[in-house]
Image (spheres, rainbow, N blue to C red):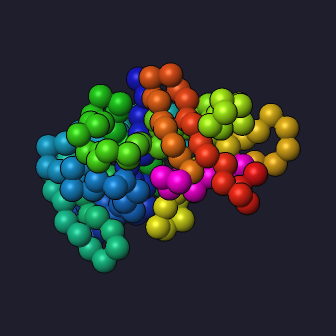
Amino acid sequence: MGYLNIGKLVNTQGIKGEVRVQVITDFPEKRFKKHNKIYAFKNDNSEPIELEIDGVRKHKNFLLLHFVDKDSINDVEFLKPSMLKINDEQQSNDDLKPGEYYYSQILGLKVFDIDDNYLGEIKDIMDLGPNDVWVVKRDSGKDLFLPKIDDVIKNVDLNNKKVTVNLMEGLE
């Protein structure tokens, strides 16, 4: 089973079992709802800790979460710091508009130009504001940086794990 990052538990909040979470999902209102199950992963590569949310509120640039049966700071102190994740089955493509993808769907796809020449494999995605930049690891030479715009990304075929791009002048 795979997991997807949705937030980082950075600290406790008060003494009643709340934790402070830095959100890293585009769907916080869906991921952090009462009764949702999420998983905490400690930095020591231990097994995931299943948690059920029973309280959510905003505080400054963070979300404050409270979990079922975690009513004291002593019950949640051991969780910090940890990554909060959902499992693959909790992810829904209903969240996406046409032409949008989860990072996990894009990483590892093979990239070809419009003449079907192999360029490399997508190894990273940089979130640079107006549009993402897909980083392609080439077999030889420097990485290729492709802005996620319609003029460059011509087709994304998730079934065949292939992306077709138009290498505009200056991108090579």
Magenta segment: 144-151
Seen at 55% across and 35% down, the residue is: 163
Q: Quadrant of the N terminus?
A: top left
Res 17 visible: no
Seen at 26% across and 74% down, the residue is: 59
Along the horizontal axis of the image, is 73 left or right of 82?
A: left
Q: Quadrant of residue 3?
A: top left
Q: Position of residue 77 (x, y in %)?
A: 38, 55
Judge by depth and name the residue closer to the eye, 78 or 32. Answer: 32
Along the horizontal axis of the image, is 167 left or right of 88?
A: right
Res 142 visible: yes
As for residue 145 lying within the magenta part, the answer is yes
As for residue 134 lying within the magenta part, the answer is no
Q: Position of residue 146 (x, y in %)?
A: 62, 52
Along the horizontal axis of the image, is 75 left or right of 170?
A: left
Q: Using the image, determine if residue 65 lies above or below residue 48.
A: below
Q: Quadrant of residue 126?
A: bottom right
Q: Position of residue 47 (x, y in %)?
A: 45, 31
Along the horizontal axis of the image, is 122 left or right of 43?
A: right
Q: Position of residue 138 (x, y in %)?
A: 76, 39
